[in-house]
């Protein structure tokens, strides 16, 4: 079996990327409730002529602030984590074996593939979620001997597919898909 390795040296940018990916992969139902609420307010203010102009203006303001505020939880989380780290950003190294992943660095131990809940990727990083609020992050460019082989190995061992955080991924995950998550 080919031995795959990867690593990451965290920074403010990686913390922000992780918080965003986590939020986009595991948004709560309240996110969608607030989004629908904002859309309804905005639609009513535009299409219902019987509403007084002052109320319409208020509805537009509340709807817009709600939409804008939907993206703030990951930013707040990242800011809190960055402040807690006080400039001491951790490093992690991963060695992918037949039955588990060997972890060294800020977190040392063994991660069994069966513990992995979801796999996600963006343009720079791979995310291995073990809980909705806990994940390991790998820099894609650090994958050795090659990234595609690493992704294929992890997908095979976990029985999960690599997804992309974001709106399109969330639309498809509104239906339960065993290949995307174990939730």
Image (tube, rainbow, N blue to C red):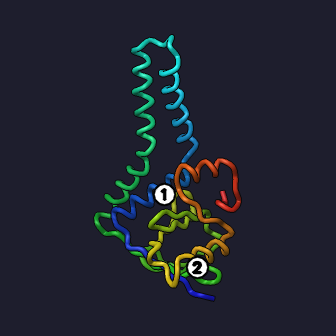
Q: Where is residue 8, by image quadrant?
A: bottom left
Q: 103 or 4, which lies in front?
A: 4
Q: Is residue 87 left or right of residue 148?
A: left
Q: 162 or 111, which lies in front?
A: 162
Disc with the residue nearer the chain's start (2 vs 1): 1
Identify the disc placed on residue 43. Answer: none
Looking at the picture, does residue 21 appear above or below residue 112? above
Q: Is residue 59 left or right of residue 147?
A: left
Discs 2/1, front: 2
Residue at point 55%, 63% (across, down): 120
Q: 65 or 30, which lies in front?
A: 65
Most extreme residue toward the bottom, as rendered? 1
Residue at point 38%, 73% (across, down): 9
| Residue 156 in picture, x, y percent from top left | 67, 74
Identify the disc placed on residue 21. Answer: 1
Find disc 2 in the rendering and name its residue: 149
Looking at the picture, does residue 43 appear above or below residue 115? above
| Residue 144 in picture, x, y percent from top left | 50, 83
Label 2: which secondary element: helix
Dot 1 surroundings within 10 Å: few (below 14), some, or many (20 or more)? many
Residue at point 42%, 25% (across, down): 60
Q: How many marks?
A: 2
Q: Where is residue 150, by image quadrant?
A: bottom right
| Residue 58 in picture, x, y percent from top left | 40, 21
| Residue 93 in picture, x, y percent from top left | 46, 79
Q: 41 or 92, which lies in front?
A: 41
């Amino acid at each position: 079996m080919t031995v795959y390795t990867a690593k990451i040296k965290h920074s403010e940018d990686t913390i922000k990327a992780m918080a965003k990916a986590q939020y986009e992969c595991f948004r709560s139902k309240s996110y969608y409730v607030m989004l629908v609420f904002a859309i309804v307010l905005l639609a009513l203010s535009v299409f219902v002529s019987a509403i007084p102009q002052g109320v319409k203006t208020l509805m537009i303001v509340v709807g817009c602030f709600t939409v804008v505020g939907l993206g703030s939880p990951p930013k707040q989380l990242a800011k809190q984590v960055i402040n807690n780290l006080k400039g001491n950003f951790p490093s992690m190294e991963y060695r992918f074996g037949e039955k588990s992943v060997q972890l060294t660095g800020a977190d040392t131990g063994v991660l069994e593939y069966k513990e992995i809940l979801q796999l996600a990727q963006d343009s720079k990083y791979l995310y291995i979620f073990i809980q909705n609020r806990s994940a390991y992050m790998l820099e894609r460019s650090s994958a050795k001997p090659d990234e595609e082989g690493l992704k294929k190995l992890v997908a095979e061992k976990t029985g999960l597919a690599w997804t992309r955080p974001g709106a399109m991924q969330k639309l498809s995950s509104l239906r339960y898909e065993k290949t995307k998550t174990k939730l």
